[in-house]
Image (spheres, rainbow, N blue to C red):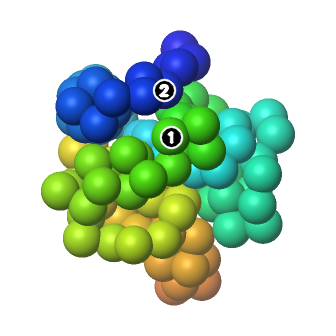
Amino acid sequence: MTFQPESEPDDVAARVDRTIEENDVVVFMKGNRLMPQCGYSKRAVQLISQYVDEFETVDVLPALDEYRAALSDHSEWETIPQTFVDGEFVGGSDVLAELDERGDLEAKLTSE
């Protein structure tokens, strides 16, 4: 499923809420899974792809400020990308990399 961003802040906030709720793993990123638009987003996709075949990505670039505001309600994190697993904020690409180095990323992504 691919989401098209809405320009109204309330629409973006509702979309963020719904996307986090409806997906086991979701990454709010610059670009998409096939064409990341920054190195951090690319790194997040690569790290997650090692362990999970199916996950959602949302391109925040068309409404970056609105997405940052909407995501802050869930994560209090300022940078993009942001990864959520089972509705819980995990972190950005740096946190994913740390989890992977410790051997904890697969368990985090695939917990039931």
Residue 16 as seen in the image, left or right of residue 27: left
Q: Residue at x 69, y 37 (%)?
A: 32
Q: Horizontal and vertical percent for residue 74?
A: 20, 56
Toward the front, the furthest residue is: 8
Q: Which mark is residue 10?
A: none
Residue at mark 2: 5
Q: Horizontal and vertical percent for residue 110?
A: 41, 47
Q: Indicate whether 97 appears above or below 31.
A: below
In the foreground, 104 or 60: 60
Classify mark 1: helix, strand or loop: helix
Classify mark 2: helix, strand or loop: loop
Instruction: Please tell me in which quadrant of the rendered image residue 21 appears.
Output: top left
Q: Residues within 10 Å of mark 2 (few under 14, many from 20)?
A: some
Toward the left, the furthest residue is: 73
Q: Residue at x 52, y 63 (%)?
A: 80
Q: Earlier in the sequence, mark 2 or mark 1?
A: 2
Residue 71 as seen in the image, left or right of residue 63: left
Q: Residue at x 24, y 70 (%)?
A: 76
Residue at mark 1: 63
Q: Is residue 82 visible?
A: yes
Q: Horizontal and vertical percent for residue 56?
A: 51, 32
In the foreground, 3 or 87: 3
Q: Is residue 100 visible?
A: no
Q: Which quadrant is home to the C terminus?
A: top left
* Residue contact between numbered discs 2 and 1, judged by CB atoms under 8 Å: yes
The amino acid type, in three-letter code, at marker 1 is: Ala
